[in-house]
Image: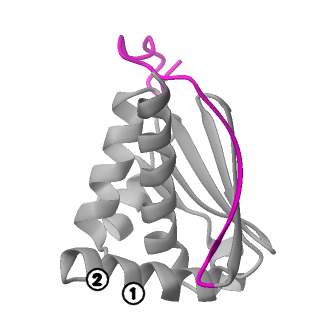
């Protein structure tokens, strides 16, 4: 079900993943089952810095609100929800199971929710760009498997 109580999208994806990688020396774990994608890193600040460098190299600009909104909306369109967890708990949620007025104001889309307690303990806005890249990778991996 979607936040509004409607049916899942017709082109919903199911993702199965258990991936451990390092992004410039920062460990990242991506686990997924069905429509839920969990991204976990013990050092969100360093992960954010690495993603910013990678994003700038690929696009000549660091990932921002427009890219985050695009990823969140793409996840939602495919019935997927992604969550970023740091060492202090949940930092960011994106996708189908998210409907946040605060996310619209802060992050540019209702399909994104910043979790204040986890985000503050995990270096402020850093998780947003990190989640952007990691979730995009998870979605692409899911599409390739189909």
Colour scheme used in the picture? one colour
In terms of depth relative to the viewer, which is nearer, 97 or 63? 63
Residue drawn at x 51%, y 64% as measured from the top left: 131
Residue 79 in the image: state x and y as whole percent.
Answer: 46, 26
Q: Which residue shows up at 77% across the image and 76% down it?
A: 42
Main SS of residues in magenta:
loop
Q: Quadrant of the C terminus?
A: top left
User: Are there few (<14), some (14-19), or many (20+) residues within 10 Å of tag 1?
Assistant: some
Q: Name the residue under label 2.
A: 57
Q: How crowded is mark 2: few (under 14 residues within 10 Å), some or many (20 or more)?
A: few
> Residue 8 lies in what quarter of the image?
top left
Q: Examine the structure image and report whether residue 8 is included in the region drawn in magenta.
A: yes
> Is residue 89 placed above or below 30 in the rendered structure?
below
Say if residue 41 shows up in the picture. Answer: yes
At 29% from the left and 74% from the top, the residue drawn is: 64
Q: Are marks 2 and 1 in contact (CB under 8 Å)?
A: yes
Give the structural element (helix, strand or loop) at label 2.
helix
In the visual, does 95 lie left or right of 83? Answer: left
Reply yes or no: does residue 55 show up in magenta. no
118 vs 67: above or below: below
Disc 1 marks which residue? 53
Position above or below: 15 against 129: above
User: Judging from the image, what secondary structure is the residue with disc 1 in?
Assistant: helix
Residues drawn in magenta? 1-24
Number of labels in the image equals 2
CA gap between label 2 and label 1 equals 6 Å
Residue toward you, 117 or 14 = 14
Quadrant in which residue 39 is drawn: bottom right
């Amino acid at each position: 079900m979607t936040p509004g109580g409607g049916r899942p999208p017709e082109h919903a994806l199911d993702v199965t993943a258990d991936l451990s990688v390092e992004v410039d020396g920062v460990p990242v774990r991506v686990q997924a089952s069905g429509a839920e994608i969990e991204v976990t890193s013990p050092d969100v600040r360093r992960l954010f810095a690495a993603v910013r460098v990678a994003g700038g190299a690929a696009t000549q600009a660091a990932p921002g609100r427009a890219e985050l909104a695009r990823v969140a909306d793409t996840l939602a369109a495919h019935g997927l929800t992604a969550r970023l967890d740091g060492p202090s708990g949940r930092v960011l949620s994106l996708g189908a199971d998210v409907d946040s007025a605060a996310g619209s104001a802060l992050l540019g889309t209702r399909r994104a929710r910043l979790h204040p307690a986890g985000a503050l303990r995990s270096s402020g806005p850093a998780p947003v760009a990190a989640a952007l890249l990691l979730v995009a990778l998870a979605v692409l991996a899911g599409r390739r498997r189909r």
